[in-house]
Image (cartoon, rainbow, N blue to C red):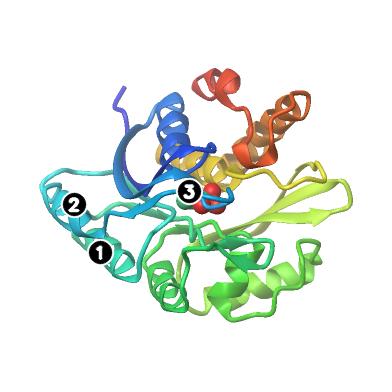
Amino acid sequence: MRIPRAACINDLSGFGRCSLTTAIAVLSASGVQACPVPTAVLSKHTGFDHYVFRDLTDSMMDYMDDWNDIEFDGIYSGFLGSDSQIQAVESFIKKHDCCVVVDPVMGDSGKLYATYTKQMQEEMKRLADCADILTPNITEICFLTDSEYCGEDISPEQAIELIKKLRKRTQARIVLTGIARDDKMINMTYDSSGISISEVKRENKVFSGTGDIFSSIVCAFTLRGRSLHESVNIAGKFISSAIERTVTSDTSLTEGVIFEPLLYKLGEI
Ligand code: PXL
């Protein structure tokens, strides 16, 4: 069997499960070769009170240029550390003819992440235009469409409105993640067959890094030929069981969800 190959452009956070540590683990377990492009190195992700941050924009350009003759089935981008870095990713995408999954990692709960600037927000809008699949959460879709953030419990009509607004600037298939509805978490997919809904049980807590697990699974399974809706269902169920496993331990929410004991399941799907 041929293993699909994806360039994973994301940061390496040493502590707090997210970004490259999650992407490499999830893609590998799902049977996809993960080729990392580190955008920044952090001692911990930015949700902790203190962390060391080193931007890798300068080395990233040469690094990606050295890959011009490598064929990728997918490019998967996540957290980006500077505005010129977002432009570098855009130019890498233009050199490779493959499926582009952009997780427009910008913020959560209505706020931009600490390292995110207004300029980066504008650059991220342009990167979204180059995507084949986009996986924003509600905060991110609001920043991408200059819409007011009204919380995580938006109605299906409001969610569809935001997706339509984003579609005005991109041809990408869109998965809007993390819509809170009573005791359910809804992920809404928009593609050529219209809107589809995927629901899982919701915990009333915000766990770090679940967006990275989600888009890593969506990237892996779509590259393996599964439909977007099916991939979203797999991602929702996996995160739900990882959260179930996490709430029974006394891990802090910032450390992310315990997914390591469950990774083998992705290889069996
Ligand atoms: O999980 C998203 C993410 C990725 N990378 C870094 C982050 C965060 C969220 O806080 O800080 C560095």
Residue designated by label 1 = 88
Which of the two marks, 3 or 1, is nearer to us in this view?
Answer: 3
Which residue is painted at 51% across and 38% down in the image? Answer: 217
Residue 33 lies, in percent from the top left, at 32, 31
Which disc, if any, is residue 51? Answer: 3
- 7 or 131: nearer the viewer: 7
Name above or below for residue 241 compared with residue 135.
above
Residue 253's x, y, as percent?
A: 69, 40
Query: Quick one: label 3 or label 1, which is nearer the N terminus?
Result: 3
Image quarter where the N terminus lies is top left
Could you tell me if the residues under marks 2 and 1 are in contact, i.e. CB atoms within 8 Å?
yes
Q: Secondary structure at mark 1?
A: helix
Look at the picture and state if 71 lies above or below 126: above
Along the line of sight, the residue nearer the viewer: 141 or 175? 141
Q: Are marks 3 and 1 in contact (CB under 8 Å)?
A: no
Q: Kindly identify the amino acid type of the residue bearing the numbered disc 1.
A: Ala
Residue at numbered disc 2:
64
Q: Residue at x 57, y 78 (%)?
A: 145
What amino acid type should be assigned to the residue bearing mark 2? Met
Q: Which labelled disc corresponds to residue 66?
A: none
In this view, 222 is above or below 241? below
